[in-house]
Amino acid sequence: MACLLLPATAHAGKKRSKPKRRGGQAEVLAGASACLPGPGDCKDDSLGKTAPSVGMAFDIGYRAHPGFFIGAGYQVGWFNPTWSLEDDQPEFSNAYQQGIFGVLRGYWSLWRFDIGFELAPGWSRQTFVRSEGDTRHYSQGFALRPGLSLDIFVSRHVFLGAKADVIFNLHRQICERTGNDTICEGGLDIRQARVHQLIGGVHVGGVF
């Protein structure tokens, strides 16, 4: 009888330890953000640059198949703007980008590893706050977030790894807001607010 029970017990134990790749899935990305040149500039030899800072993203959705995830996500990334005016005063006190996305991700799985290839369309706004006065410049509109992740299941439900997202801002609108007054045009002379962003770092989540 004991000999008959051993294979069944081993099979049940193997099934319990096998990564769960179907069901609800939630995940967090936390790490660094960097500016990528686009219609706007990330650097000027004499005026300064949009330097790196920190960023994060939150995704939640459903893994309907071991090789496919669909969900929604929120992303925010900060910049460290070192741009200066002619009198060497800082031009901006703060800069950041945030967006919401519909997430479509495919997986290639090997043992406990998942390699994810993501394409996430959505909407984003990128804001640069002037250091003096109550003025901020921002661009907003359609954005596309491709991403690449490498994760390992450290338990049946929890995975840990690394992820990198590139947020391409395909914005058609740029605005200047001072107090309660907002002007939105296609040709406002503010170069910095039309850049792209890279966010990469630690990726952790679970399937439940």
Image (cartoon, grey):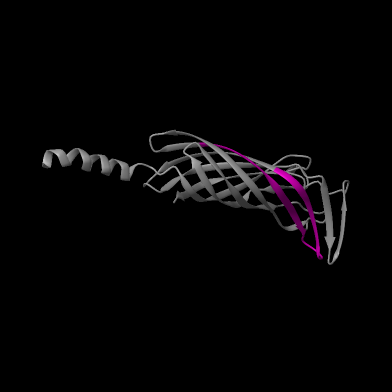
Kindly identify the residue that appears in the image at 38 percent across and 46 percent down: 154
Q: Is the magenta stretch mostly helix, strand or loop?
A: strand
* Residue 117 inside the magenta-drawn segment: yes
Number of marks in the rendered image: 0
From the viewer's perspective, is 101 left or right of 40? left
Residue 182 location, quadrant: bottom right
Kindly identify the residue that appears in the image at 50 percent across and 44 percent down: 63
> Who is closer to the viewer here, 206 or 99?
206
The reply to whether residue 169 is visible in this rendering is: yes
Kindly identify the residue that appears in the image at 72 percent across and 40 percent down: 37
Q: Residue 38: horizontal and vertical position, in percent?
A: 75, 39
Up/down of 81 relative to 114, above or below: below
Residue 21 location, quadrant: top left
Q: What stretch is highlighted in magenta?
A: 116-143
Q: Residue 189: horizontal and vertical position, in percent?
A: 87, 48
From the viewer's perspective, is 85 left or right of 158? right
The reply to whether residue 86 is visible in this rendering is: no
> Who is closer to the viewer here, 18 or 134?
18
Q: Residue 82: horizontal and vertical position, in percent?
A: 71, 52
Up/down of 10 relative to 128, above or below: above
Q: Residue 172: horizontal and vertical position, in percent?
A: 82, 45
From the viewer's perspective, is 113 left or right of 43? left
Quadrant that contains the N terminus? top left
* Residue 10 inside the magenta-drawn segment: no
> Who is closer to the viewer here, 23 or 73?
23
